[in-house]
Image (tube, helix red, strand yellow):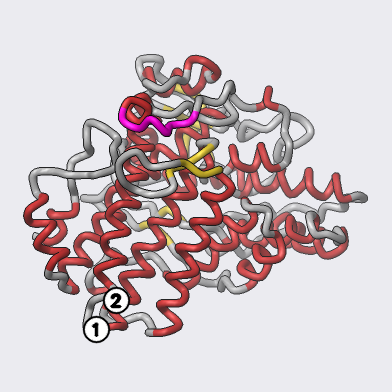
Amino acid sequence: MSVLICIVMIPSGCKKDYTDPNKAMEDDLFANPSKAGLAGVATGLQRVYTLGRASNLYNLVTINGLLTNELIVVNTGNTAEVQLAAGGTAVDGNHSMLTTFWTNLNKVIYDADRVITSAKTLGDKNFGSSLIAYASIFKALSIADLSQFWEKVPSGIGVNVSFIDRVDGFKKAIAVIDEALAAIAANALSTSFSLYVPTGIDMINTLHALRARYSLFAGLYAQASTEANLVDLTKKSTFNFDALSLNPLYEVATSTNNVVQPKDSTLGLLVPLQPSLTDGRVPFYTSINSTIAPRFRIKGFGDAAATAFPVYLPGEMILIKAEAYARAAVPDLVNGTIELNKVVTKNNDIYGVNANQPPAAPATIPELLEQIYRHRCIELFMSGLKLEDMRRFGRPTAERKRNLMPYPLRERDNNPNTPPDPPF
């Protein structure tokens, strides 16, 4: 019953005072919190974030992929995807995928807040800290996803909420992670918690990895490097799927060949940034169908119904350190290149994401940054991070379909504080 309670209906408006027919049961659950009940709601966070075409994971990867030329639309009947591929004014406040993405991200934040608040009241403090850590992962992901796509993001949940700058959104996500790490420091993770939630997520490593990612996005380079060093790169952390809970990329795109597919072996990059013909990451992320168009197909982390999707990749952490060296107050070409080449020459990745290329030899910091961008695009293909990278590395706007997203009309109609839409 507890799992069903948390799978609430998506509201028709975006006032962020989420209600549904199960509200009486939900209110009772939070008024009298139990380990099993709160774990059920927490499990619901992962379901909303990862399962189905409406999931945050599918929308993150697909919206990003179409805007940055990683992906193409296979069937022009998929109107929302076609609009993203066209970009510009074709993407407006009525866009169905962006509206769903915005609504579900805010829904996850809302439910995560309730779990975190109630977890603090549990008598079992170790279980409580586990709930806080687990819910905080999805809350931080959701705040940061909003911050990657919108110029300003809601400051909280409620009616007529104010907005904050997107960089402050990343800092807010970091603050959520800090609270979770403090909870774990005070009360170690419960050994029984894994019996209540889906397997796959390594919570401590994930919290440090996300803190590294969002510190980088917020321009906190020394902090980003420190956090990346705290991540054990021999451990996996994944969203897991099975025959009943399908990988959404496989379910919607790979299995049907009717929505989106990779552009081609360039992974959407222009000369001279395109991957080498011998780069092992191209056949990892794409396969070839020689008989039915399109020729290039999704492989990698959308390959099959039960393919796990990494919350972060080891290569991402290494490239964060490389970029932190390059962007330090006193840029460090030598150490930045050493970290870059750990990815360029990698042949033992725990997921099989291996470039296996000869070392790069950038001669200047601008060359190093260009190579870091290039290898982030290849290493993190279809991760949902490329649009943020394009802005951070100052790539020409002509290389993407939009820079930032318009606000859903549902938000604008219900919240007078909604900012003006960005021009592009």
Task: Say what secondary structure mark 2 lies in.
Answer: helix
- For the record, the magenta segment spans 414-419
Crowding around mark 2 (Cα neighbors within 10 Å: few <14, some 14 to 19, many 20+) is many
According to the image, label 2 marks what residue? 128
Horizontal placement of 204 versus 268: left or right? left
Residue contact between numbered discs 2 and 1, judged by CB atoms under 8 Å: yes
Where 306 sits versus 20, above or below?
Answer: below
Give the label on residue 136, or none: none
Q: Is residue 415 magenta?
A: yes
Where 246 sits versus 91, above or below?
Answer: below
Horizontal placement of 85 versus 11: left or right? right
Residue at left offset 41%, top offset 84% = 186
According to the image, label 1 marks what residue? 124
- The Cα–Cα distance between marks 2 and 1, rounded to whole angstroms, is 6 Å
Q: Position of residue 369 (x, y in %)?
A: 79, 47
Q: Nearer the viewer, residue 43 or 37?
A: 37
Q: How many marks?
A: 2
Crowding around mark 1 (Cα neighbors within 10 Å: few <14, some 14 to 19, many 20+) is some
Quadrant position of the N terminus in the picture:
bottom left
Q: Amino acid at mark 1?
A: Asp
